[in-house]
Amino acid sequence: MSERGPAPAAAVPPTSTPRPPTSRNLAAALTVGAAVRLALQYAPAVTALRTTAQSSILTTTPLTRWSRIQEALYLYNRGLPLYDNALVHQPPILLPLLSVIPASMHPLLLTVIDTAVAAGLATLAHRQRELEPAAHAPVDADEEQKDPGAKIQGGGVAWTPAAVALAYLLNPLSILSCIAMDAGVIERGAMMAAAVFASGGDSIWASGAITVAFQMGFYPVALAPILALIQRRATHLSAFGVIPAVIISILMWNIIFYTFYTNVMDLDGMAVFKATTGFVLSVPDLQPNLGIFWYLLTEVFDHFRGFFVMVFQLHPFVYLAPIIMRFGRETPIFCLTVYTGVLATLKAYPTVGDYALWLGLLPLYASTWKYFRYPFITANVAVYCAFLFPIMHALWTRFASGNANFFYALTLVLVLGATVLQADCLHAMHVRMHHAHAYAVDKVHAAEAEEREFDEPVVEGRATAVEDRAERMRYRGGKGVKKTEDEEGKGEVKKVPARRVEVHKLPTLIVYLEE
């Protein structure tokens, strides 16, 4: 018997802990982004731009307009009822904090929160390789030879954590949202804080942050199971234990907040719920925005309004279970990325800031961009909408030469482009994971073939159908019969036990919540 060769390589190379991001580059990126925002917030030369942005229906909604928060602060500071009107829809938890900060410093506060969102994106980019090795499994020999801690390559750019943060900070949509004093910045900051805490395995603070986001806009509560799966990847706990724990924590945080509202702030808890969460659920304010609710609910008969509101509100939650079932076990941060886009598209009161957060998460998976099918279409839709939205809105409201159909038609184009991009993200990740799985299987087969060369004599002239079928069955994991010749030249039939591929060590295509 010949000597055994070297041991075959593992199906999936172990992923080492990624190197920490360069703090100097990240600090420079955050400084640049904050400086741009502060210059636009306080520079006298751009006062007209600030005024236009703060009154635009693209950047603010009745739920996030800063003038309504100022109204709430006025009532709160004078001890007047907060929710006996149809103007205030923000949670009371913000008011004690904002009341002690001078009004001139409120733009600085939003700038700090938006910069913190970018820092959270950089943190996720740093932790992602360790939490989601399946998303970065090699698809060919070239990728396998790269350092596991190497930068994410995509679009001709090396996406370091600092580059991810800078891409968000220099995104015109995020800048426009910040200078418009969009209160949705606070909601997005809470969402990002929840994701960062979950990626660090801290369920208590992750639940508290997502509770703040829930009270700001209701829809972030759907991220609870995704955050639980992210925490599961960080702590290696059972999903059936983590998910209920996160849900219970969110309920407890809500109880704490409403106890504070009723006992400390002396507010009616039911009035707070109706004015905040109830406002989002019932959609009473039909001012135009980037969503699809306002136009359809304006046209529908009042008799059917409740049914349509129910359908529209349930629509975003329909996609949660399929996304988690397919990608939740191995790539929960990818689920967060995709579902953030779903919420930005289908929520009742979206703004450009919601799209900015979604686009800020996409560079985390730049390695999948090469598998996109319709990048040209989505890029053109983005450019067309950026130019045509202000024009259509001006034709409708300023020059009275158009109507609501002009603006809403462009809204449908935006939703279509966002849907195509979401489908591309799902398709690209599916294809990449499939290629990585196929490459891992090929490596196992090659290792088995190399091992057989050392363990078994080489037999010439094997061309019969029986031998071919036996060899095929061998690769499939079935029992095969191989005809060999002994050293004296006498033919004999010998059963060779087949070696099964250990598929549990490979990136699986069937995703479960548990091992």
Image (cartoon, rainbow, N blue to C red):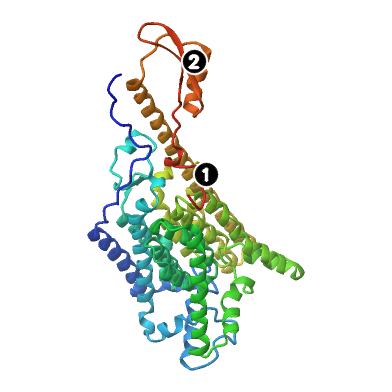
Q: How many neighbours does mark 2 have within 10 angstroms: few (below 14), some (14-19), or many (20 or more)?
A: some
Report the residue that reaches farthest toward the right: 303
Q: Residues within 10 Å of mark 1 (few under 14, many from 20)?
A: few
**Image point 37% across, 76% down: which residue?**
109
Which image quadrant is residue 290 in? bottom right
At 42% from the left and 72% from the top, the residue drawn is 50
Badge 2 element:
helix
Can I make out residue 49 in this image?
A: no
Q: Residue furthest top?
A: 489
The quadrant in which residue 163 appears is bottom left
Check residue 510 in the rendering and tell me which mark sits there, or answer none: 1
Q: Which mark is nearer the camera, 1 or 2?
A: 2
Work out whether residue 416 or residue 320 is closer to the camera in this orientation and state it: 320
* Residue located beneath label 2 in the image: 467
Look at label 1 and name its amino acid: Ile
Q: Between residues 321 and 387, which one lies in front from this camera angle?
A: 321
- Circle 2: residue type: Glu
